[in-house]
Amino acid sequence: MKHISNIWKTSVLLFAALTFAFVSCSSSDDDNDSEDSVDKTAIANRIVQNMVKVDGGTFTMGYDSYVVDGVEHKAHSYDAMHQVTLSSYYICKYPVTQKEYEAIMGTNPSKWVGENIPVNKVTWAECQNFISALNKLTNHTFRLPTEAEWEFAARGGNRSQNYTFAGSNNINEVAWYLDNSDSTLHAVGLKKPNELGIYDMTGNVCEWCNDWANNYPEEAVTNPTGPTTGNYRILRGGSYCWETYLCAVYYRHWEDPAIRYNNIGFRLAFTQ
């Protein structure tokens, strides 16, 4: 009986210990979930705070030619100059960083890693997934900027000084590009902002826009969103591995939306 009693006591103690361990683990998991939720909310709020209002206005999109480093670059047939009128909207001060992307999505697809470096190697669809997740955490409807919104903001909106690059005619003041990047991406916000206080719209990462690629219209348009279908999505801004003339605010580029390159990221916009 004494032997049985000891076994019973041992069993009770073991059961109590296992119960305590289970409760402790469950409590720890709940705490982690709570911390994750708080972290996501903090990141989402920071993104909202970094949105810059771009007052609506009218500008001429496209170009005839521009000169960089003494060389004239003439427009292609798909770059026809045309008048664009935009309503007011918001665009983020910075490209989406890896810290932001990973906090919301739990993953990081980037080749060049660093929490304040723009997320890179993202497909167009992955940008949409991030936006959907972010919208669930906020009262805003985030989206990618249209190509016209991107260019108007890069040019400085209604405060534009008609610079070739976003904020300067001297690309070294505002951008990481082929000649100064050391062949890698850099943290956001290290260069001079443009007239609206927006950073890195020239160089660092090319940025996905919402539009399908197509020729510019020749007539005046209001709040254009591009064609309804297509094969390629628009990218703007140039990148850390591009030559100077490819980083001009006028320059257009497009890729298969499923492509993932080391120099592709994105920036957020919303209309309030």
Image (spheres, helix red, strand yellow):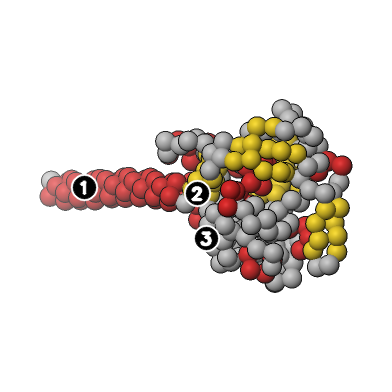
Dividing the picture into quadrants, the one containing residue 81 is top right
Tell me the amino acid under the disc marked 3: Glu
Residue visible at 57% across and 61% down?
193
Give residue 65's position: percent from left, percent from top.
83, 53
Residue labelled with disc 2: 52
| Mark 3 crowdedness (10 Å alpha carbons): few <14, some 14-19, many ≥20 | some
Could you tell me how far apart the alpha carbons at marks 3 and 1 are, in whole angstroms? 43 Å
| Sequence order check, earlier mark of 3 and 1 | 1
Q: Indicate the secondary structure of the residue bearing disc 2.
A: strand
Residue labelled with disc 3: 115
Residue visible at 60% across and 48% down?
157
| Sequence order check, earlier mark of 1 and 2 | 1
Q: Indicate the secondary structure of the residue bearing disc 1.
A: helix
| Mark 1 crowdedness (10 Å alpha carbons): few <14, some 14-19, many ≥20 | few
| Mark 2 crowdedness (10 Å alpha carbons): few <14, some 14-19, many ≥20 | some
Of badges 1 and 2, nearer the viewer stands 2
Of badges 3 and 1, nearer the viewer stands 3
Q: Where residue 16 is drawn, which disc sits there?
A: 1
Q: Indicate the secondary structure of the residue bearing disc 3.
A: loop
Instruction: Identify which residue, 105 or 19, lies in the foreground.
Output: 105
Tell me the amino acid under the disc marked 1: Ala
154 vs 228, left or right, is: left
Tell me the amino acid under the disc marked 2: Val
Instruction: Identify which residue, 251 or 188, lies in the foreground.
Output: 251
Instruction: Identify which residue, 145 or 208, lies in the foreground.
Output: 145
Q: Residue furthest top?
A: 228
| Sequence order check, earlier mark of 3 and 2 | 2
Residue visible at 20% across and 50% down?
13
Residue visible at 69% across and 32% down?
221
